[in-house]
Image: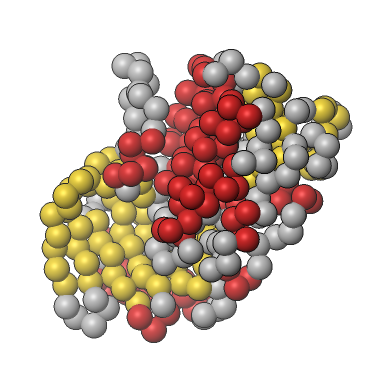
Amino acid sequence: MHVAVVGAGPAGSTTALRLAEAGARVTVFDASHPREKPCGGGLTAKALRLLPAAPADDPLPVRLVQRCRFDSGSGETVEVDLDRPVGIASRRALDGWLLRRAVAAGAQHVAERVVHVDGQGRVRTAGGAELTFDVVVGADGAGSVVRRLLLSPTPPARLMMAAGWFARGDSEMVVRFAPDLQGYLWLFPRPGHVGVGICAPLGRVPTRQMTARLESEVARAYPALADDEAPRYAHTIPSPSTDPRSLLEVAGERWALVGDAAALADPITGEGIYYALRSGELLAATLREDGSPRRYPERMLEAGGRELL
């Protein structure tokens, strides 16, 4: 079996890694590495358990945090010792590390952007190459080209908006709720810097207003992290609808979607890395066992539907 994986984030690299370990031919298309991504970078304990073993000469680039300050947004705060540590990573470092694991297992990384796919396994790159695969995996994020061409974009009602920046310095881990936005603000201490962010349902408030809210609250409570020189980012986080069919539609005869491309993120917290890793593993297992992605949506619904819907 020859599989094309479009996108080398956690979902794509996990799919590629597990397939390559089983002896499949895997080609991963991603022209963006190395790059940072607009993401908090949090890995819950269940996400950490899904990561492959780290070789001695390439340790996992994750900072483990055992304590978090929760802020109600109206003045009440509590510090909690976590039962299991949370990992926090730069996406540049984590995604690069996962891609290296996939390549070490035998996957081929092609640094080209995919501009077209069809339901018959055909792929065209920005450089003009046209190739045919047994299965095409869309792992190209919330704005997935593969999803747009083979299914449809995630509807706006199922999107959250996140905004923020990466600040120099260090911080405790903080989650501050914003009930009026139906969202929250965060400070996530990564290796070497701090992820500062805010998220809320798309359209709840304009993105500029949401970013200004974050800047104001950080400047007041954590002035060292205001970092006016840091570039600001904004991006969408997709999630499934309450209708189980929103998970059952993410595969066809010769294609499948994983991670954000499949709209797999927690609809309350926006957590996406766990579902990226889990969907990649489930799709790889389905392809190994069946040679087809047909049973993958049902398996994803069984494994994650209770948490996601």
Q: Is residue 160 visible?
A: yes
What is the count of numbered marks? 0
- Please indicate, yes or no, whether residue 96 appears anywhere in the rendered image: no
Give left or right: position of 107 versus 194. right
> Residue 89 sits in which quadrant?
top left
Q: Residue at x 17, y 78 (%)?
A: 76
Residue 7, image x and y in percent? 62, 38
Between residue 125 and residue 197, name the one nearer to us: 125
Could you say which is closer to the camera, residue 42 or residue 35?
42
Q: Name the residue located 72 percent from the left edge and 35 percent from the top edge.
A: 136
Q: Quadrant of the N terminus?
A: top right
Q: Position of residue 207 (x, y in %)?
A: 54, 73
In the picture provided, is 277 more to the left or to the right than 190? right
- Residue 288's image quarter? top right
Q: Nearer the viewer, residue 138 or 128?
A: 138
> Residue at 13% across / 54% down in the picture?
81
- Quarter residue 199 falls in: bottom left
Whole-percent x, y for residue 25 in the image: 66, 19
Say which residue appears at 36% left-offset and 70% top-offset.
184
Judged left or right of residue 282, residue 150 is right
Q: Position of residue 123 (x, y in %)?
A: 80, 35
Query: How are the residues colored?
Result: secondary structure
